[in-house]
């Protein structure tokens, strides 16, 4: 009888299993077999550990792992700290007429372009900004530096991976900042700050001891997404990271792309190792945060009212705008490149201009743009509906999906795409799905859904249940509660999750190419294949186009709730 | 006199006649066969999977499609790849799923290691090359350049379409006397520290640089045409590592970091960050100038002994959906008019793969009338073509380099 009463729960579970879980397992299955020597398409049928042996004998493997860990942890912590500081700054009540305070209303709109731009485009822009032959050097050469030719300095692709860390921070800071600002709407920041002030806590101390401990649980999963992305990125590592040896993700990618198909076996072992490394990193991060939280609680109990953060906040106040300016300049310089013909060192501006690439694209891109938008709208809409349905079913019928299920859903984020897609492709072909729009939307969904779910779940669960209780006591039906209370109170996080889904879908290269069998060209399939030719002018044109769609989505996500509120007030 | 008389014996005469008519008949049937292929191909679209990083190549492929559509009602759709292995993976996945017909890939721009992999795994359609009418313009004798791909016999499984030669590119305003050999390259690096580099070794162009040095420095280059073993590799490559140890400290970033591929390396040349770039296309400098990617003073040079050369091919996967149409496109690619259009520096500037002794006088005139460019070397200036070593040398070079220099 339980079963019939709870049928929506089981139906939801079945949908999730069919649409997400089975493809993920199928995709991962092939990779796992291959890592243990079984790849029938290559005539390999017997179990063997050779692939692992080959992997562990790889020169520079330890360096690759170290580079991945350093860039992952460093970029995530720095981006998180800066995002939290950014929130504190936006919420600060200081009205001193300083330049920084005048900029405050523009902070959020300025974040959006960086958030919307593809990772690779930001990386190429930043590389051009910082390189010894780059824009900054050109602005000051030769009149200040006396450089007629660029010097041989490691300002990008340094051996420690610091420029990669910088690139990741630039790209992830806006994401964490916006997610935090949206989450903070569920915490009464100004009220709590004034109470803290009246108890003698400085603003910095109040954020540290009162606000952040409430905020972090709301952004925990997005932070983990950032950590996982930083560990697995190929797009940024190939442009900003060291390459001899490279990060583990890039090394894996190179193996997969090698002309020698026999290397698919050690590549699969490397892909699994990278997945395990990411899982271990997530666990380590979680434990570290728990320890920090416990220590914070202890400090709060001790009750110190001192102001130990003065030095830190000074440093953060210079770092934060510098990071944002670097991010925006990276995009500006790409925009300049998109109308450049030649730009020689040390000219501060292009030597000659041309609109040739824009003109050429106008004849070509409508179809690619149309495909990109269809894929993004389709996959993000399905992802939002699935996420909301899942959360709502859980609210009504109780019970959480097991931890294992959760991990499985997040697996597409934990395994290099190329490793996962081969198996998925084989699976899709077996059930007769090939080359259609549907297959590509489905493949996108596997990557879009975890992002949408992760961005939404914390805010959903933090919804103040008393609203619902009051509504229910006034006789509102459960559907009424859902439509009129939950969806309207959660409109902003919902729209933001949708916009993130749009951006994730727009950026998909390999799933579009492989599941579409090369027959569905999108902005990104065009851009990535052209980017392998390293023409900054083309990267500029496509990068701006690729950013345009998510930019509109984020714009809607941020503005729509405000417009609706204004409308209601009328 | 007797032997001649013998020929006139009626029995033998019939035999000769029948042989002659058989030849005639088989020629007729060849034409019939090709007509069948054309009929089958009409109305189809060929999905040509090709690296998409070069705008001029993409434009050429789209021109090919316009032509074949007008001539044979066959459309060409380029699937732009960032790496040829993406197409190989696609075919492999189809094979794994048991999809042995109706595959998504109709034609691949391929050569060397990717070809070897597909041939070994039985992923290619053919042999079909000698069924193409235009194959008569190719030199397909067993050891000719068009019949061997990185020492692997082509066996009629792929059609050559453009010539590739390893060349260096310099900015002639900055470098007046480029090094004339790989040994001279060391002197150049010592005199200009930090101004020389090569693409990463996992990249095709990075290993090509090493192979060029290996061929020039090794005591007996003929060994390189055999498979590499532990013993012959150690002896043959010893002078290479000695040379590399000497040159490495003078490379860009002291040889600790490298450009990801040749395109990035050419961008560095254009930015003035280094003095020498590399390409697998004699027209690279001229094309780079024409598209604004290189300074007008860019020029190519090759070592005096010559440089590595190979040919780009197209192959058809065993399970392609439009095999006939792909054959029609492949045949169109080796049409003398197509090759002349391709060799035009305003189009691609890639040298023709046709045998100059087999094309008509009219065709030769068309090639001779092509425009020239200061940055485009003549075939004579390019010097001799050095043969690609057996593919196993590439694998061993990569492994050994990583052991020695990748911490």
Image: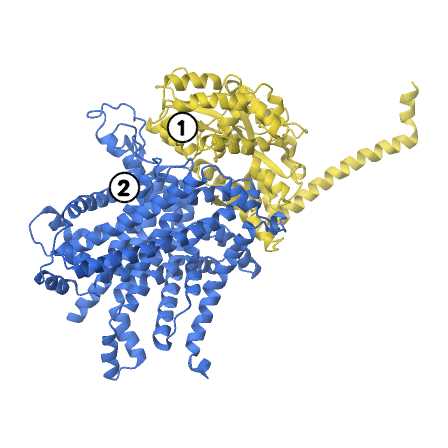
**Where in the figure is residue A265, as x and y percent of width and height?**
55, 46
Which one is in front in this view, the residue at disc 1 or the one at disc 2? Answer: 1
Residue B253 lies left or right of residue B370; in this view the side is left
Front in this rendered view, residue B320 or B372: B320
Labels 1 and 2 touching (C-beta < 8 A): no
Q: Circle 2 sits in a helix, a strand or a loop, which is it?
A: helix
Q: Which mark is residue B255?
A: 1
Q: Position of residue A103 (x, y in %)?
A: 14, 49
Which quarter of the picture shows residue B148? top right
Q: Which residue is mark 2?
A: A330
Q: Does residue A499 lie above or below A385 as drawn?
A: above
**Residue sitting nearer the eye, A111 or B155:** A111
Q: Is residue A108 visible?
A: no
- Subunit that carries the residue with mark 1: B
Q: Which color is chain B depicted in?
A: yellow
Chain holding disc 2: A
Q: Which chain is blue?
A: A
């Amino acid at each position: 009888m339980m079963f019939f009463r709870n049928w929506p729960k089981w139906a939801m579970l079945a949908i999730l299993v069919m649409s997400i879980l089975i493809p993920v397992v199928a995709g991962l299955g092939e990779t796992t077999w291959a890592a243990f020597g079984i790849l029938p398409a290559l005539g390999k049928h017997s179990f063997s550990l050779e692939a692992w042996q080959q992997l562990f004998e790889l020169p520079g493997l330890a360096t690759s792992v170290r580079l991945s860990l350093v860039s992952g942890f460093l970029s995530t912590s720095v981006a998180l700290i800066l995002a939290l500081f950014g929130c504190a700054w936006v919420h600060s009540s200081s009205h001193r007429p300083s330049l920084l305070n005048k900029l405050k209303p523009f902070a959020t709109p300025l974040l959006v372009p960086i958030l919307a731009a593809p990772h690779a485009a930001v990386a190429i822009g930043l590389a051009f900004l910082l390189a010894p032959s780059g824009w900054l050097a050109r602005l000051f050469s030769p009149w200040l530096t006396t450089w007629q030719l660029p010097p041989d300095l490691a300002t990008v692709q340094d051996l420690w991976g610091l420029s990669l860390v910088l690139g990741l921070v630039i790209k992830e800071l806006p994401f964490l900042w916006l997610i935090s600002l949206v989450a903070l709407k569920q915490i009464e920041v100004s009220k709590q700050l004034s109470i803290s002030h009246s108890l003698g806590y400085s603003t910095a101390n109040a954020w540290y001891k009162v606000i952040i401990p409430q905020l972090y649980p709301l952004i925990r999963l997005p932070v983990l997404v950032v950590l996982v992305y930083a560990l697995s990125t190929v797009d940024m590592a190939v442009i900003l990271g060291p390459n001899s040896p490279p990060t583990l993700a890039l090394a894996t990618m190179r193996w997969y792309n090698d002309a020698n198909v026999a290397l698919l076996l050690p590549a699969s072992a490397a892909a699994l190792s990278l997945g395990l490394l990411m899982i271990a990193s997530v666990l380590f991060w979680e434990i570290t945060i728990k320890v920090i939280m416990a220590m914070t609680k202890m400090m709060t109990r001790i009750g110190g009212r001192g102001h130990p953060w003065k030095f830190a906040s000074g440093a953060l106040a210079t770092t934060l705008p510098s990071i944002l300016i670097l991010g925006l300049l990276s995009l500006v310089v790409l925009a300049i490149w998109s109308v450049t013909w030649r730009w020689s060192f040390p000219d501060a501006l292009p030597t000659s201009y041309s609109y040739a690439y824009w003109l050429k694209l106008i004849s070509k891109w409508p179809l690619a743009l149309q495909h990109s938008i269809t894929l993004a709208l389709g996959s993000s809409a399905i992802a939002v509906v699935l996420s909301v349905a899942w959360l709502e079913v859980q609210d009504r019928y109780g019970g959480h999906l097991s931890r294992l299920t959760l991990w499985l859903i997040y697996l597409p984020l934990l395994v290099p795409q190329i490793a996962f897609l081969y198996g998925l492709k084989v699976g899709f072909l077996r059930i007769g799905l090939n080359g259609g729009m549907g297959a590509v939307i489905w493949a996108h969904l596997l990557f879009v859904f975890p992002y949408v779910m992760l961005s939404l779940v914390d805010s959903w669960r933090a919804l103040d249940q008393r609203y619902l209780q009051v509504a229910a006591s006034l006789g509102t039906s459960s559907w009424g509660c859902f439509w009129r209370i939950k969806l309207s109170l959660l409109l902003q996080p919902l729209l933001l999750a949708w916009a993130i889904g749009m951006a994730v879908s727009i950026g998909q290269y390999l799933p579009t190419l492989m599941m579409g069998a090369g027959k569905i060209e999108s902005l990104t399939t065009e851009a990535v294949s052209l980017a392998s030719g390293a023409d900054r002018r083309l990267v500029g044109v496509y990068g701006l186009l690729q950013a345009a769609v998510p930019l509109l989505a984020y714009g809607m996500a941020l503005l729509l709730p405000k417009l609706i509120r204004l409308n209601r007030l009328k | 006199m007797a032997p001649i008389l013998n020929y006139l014996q009626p029995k033998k005469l019939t035999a000769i006649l029948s042989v002659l008519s058989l030849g005639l008949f088989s020629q007729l049937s060849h034409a019939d066969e090709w007509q069948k292929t054309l009929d089958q191909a009409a109305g189809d679209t060929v999905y040509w999977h090709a690296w998409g990083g070069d705008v001029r190549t993409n434009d050429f492929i789209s021109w090919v499609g316009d032509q074949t559509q007008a001539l044979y009602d066959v459309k060409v759709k380029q699937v732009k790849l960032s790496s040829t292995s993406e197409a190989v993976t696609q075919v492999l996945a189809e094979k794994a799923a048991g999809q042995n017909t109706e595959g998504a890939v109709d034609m691949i721009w391929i050569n060397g290691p990717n070809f070897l992999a597909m041939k070994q795994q039985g992923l290619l359609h053919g042999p079909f090359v000698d069924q193409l009418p235009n194959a008569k313009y190719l030199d397909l004798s067993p050891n000719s350049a068009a019949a061997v791909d990185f020492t692997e016999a082509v066996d009629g499984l792929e059609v050559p379409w453009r010539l590739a030669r390893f060349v260096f590119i310099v900015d002639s305003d900055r470098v007046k006397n480029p090094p004339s050999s790989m040994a001279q390259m060391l002197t150049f690096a010592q005199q200009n520290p930090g101004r020389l580099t090569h693409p990463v070794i996992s990249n095709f162009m990075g290993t090509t640089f090493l192979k060029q040095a290996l061929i020039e420095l090794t005591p007996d280059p003929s060994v390189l045409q055999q498979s590499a073993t532990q013993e012959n590799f150690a002896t043959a490559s010893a002078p290479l590592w000695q040379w590399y140890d000497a040159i490495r400290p003078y490379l860009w970033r002291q040889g600790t970091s490298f450009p990801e591929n040749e395109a990035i390396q050419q961008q560095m040349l254009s930015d003035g960050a280094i003095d020498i770039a590399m390409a697998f296309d004699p027209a690279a400098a001229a094309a780079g100038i024409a598209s604004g990617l290189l300074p007008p003073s860019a020029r190519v040079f090759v070592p005096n002994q010559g440089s590595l050369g190979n040919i780009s091919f197209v192959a058809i996967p065993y399970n392609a959906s439009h095999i006939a149409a792909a054959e029609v496109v492949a045949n169109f690619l080796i049409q003398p008019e197509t090759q002349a259009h391709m060799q035009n520096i305003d189009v691609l500037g890639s040298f023709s793969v046709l045998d100059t002794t087999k094309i008509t006088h009219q065709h030769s005139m068309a090639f001779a009338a092509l425009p020239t460019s200061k940055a485009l070397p003549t075939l004579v200036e390019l010097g001799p073509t050095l043969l690609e070593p057996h593919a196993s040398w590439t694998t061993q070079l990569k492994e050994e380099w990583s052991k020695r220099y990748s911490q």
